[in-house]
Amino acid sequence: MPKRRNVSMSVVRRLPRYYRFLYQLKNKGVVRISSTELSQKIGLTASQIRQDLNCFGGFGQQGYGYIVSQLCDEIGNILGLSNGYRTVLFGAGNLGTAIANHMSFQKEGFKLIGIFDSSPDKIGKTLADITIQDVKNTEDFCKREKPVMAVFCVPRNAVDDLSSRIYKLGVRNFWNFSHYDIAMEYPDAVVENVHLNDSLMTLCYRISNPAE
């Protein structure tokens, strides 16, 4: 069904959660599920699930529920998981190595095509079946391969120059693990910031202040 415009980001951020649980159910051979049963597995109310899915037209039938495989595929289509957006990764340190080796880019809508680093110890080595290139080769590579998304696993002080270079090459989408706010510099860019320290401090607060 066609997507509605102006869907809130809070709804969009719940879609991967729905997809993950439905994908697991699909692999277990579950054919049908109600919003109530799904709510018990996900931890959201059945009403919230129905409201979220209705933003995209709704997929269930009253009294019957949702066909698991169909809903899983529909949410995958909404998320664009088959698009295979060409992606480059900067920083082959511990974090970059973990992401390249363990993130299933292809299943999540992307295709990792290049990895760059400035360290002579890393350049020329292989990571995730890709040869790590010198970051100096960025312009030539991007002009030739035309990536649309960049992953930053580099120190904050390296992102200013790097993001400027990448932006000038036409890349407007960033998965940013640094603490540099790319969106402030480039308002038209699509940026997902991943602040692991913020997440850890949030966990610390929740442990320190348990809910009643």
Image (cartoon, rainbow, N blue to C red):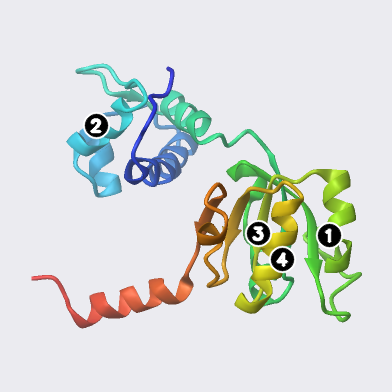
User: Which mark is in front, 3 or 1?
Assistant: 1
Image quadrant containing the N terminus: top left
Pointer 4: residues within 10 angstroms few (<14), some, or many (20+)?
some
| Residue name at image x 33 percent, y 24 percent | 66
For residue 162, the mark is 4
Secondary structure under the numbered disc 2 in the rendered image:
helix
Question: Which mark sits nearer the N-terminus, 3 or 4?
Answer: 3
Three-letter amino acid code of the residue under disc 1: Thr
* 3D distance between C-alphas at marks 2 and 3: 33 Å
- State the residue position of label 2: 51
Report if the CB atoms under discs 2 and 3 are less than 8 Å apart.
no
Which residue is located at x 74 percent, y 52 percent? 168
Query: Please, what secondary structure does the residue beneath circle 4 have?
Result: helix
The foreground one among 153 and 58 is: 153
Question: Residues under labels 4 and 2: Cα distance?
Answer: 41 Å
Proximity of marks 3 and 1: CB atoms separated by less than 8 Å:
no
Report the mark closest to the observer, 4 or 2: 4
Please say if 65 is above or below 188: above
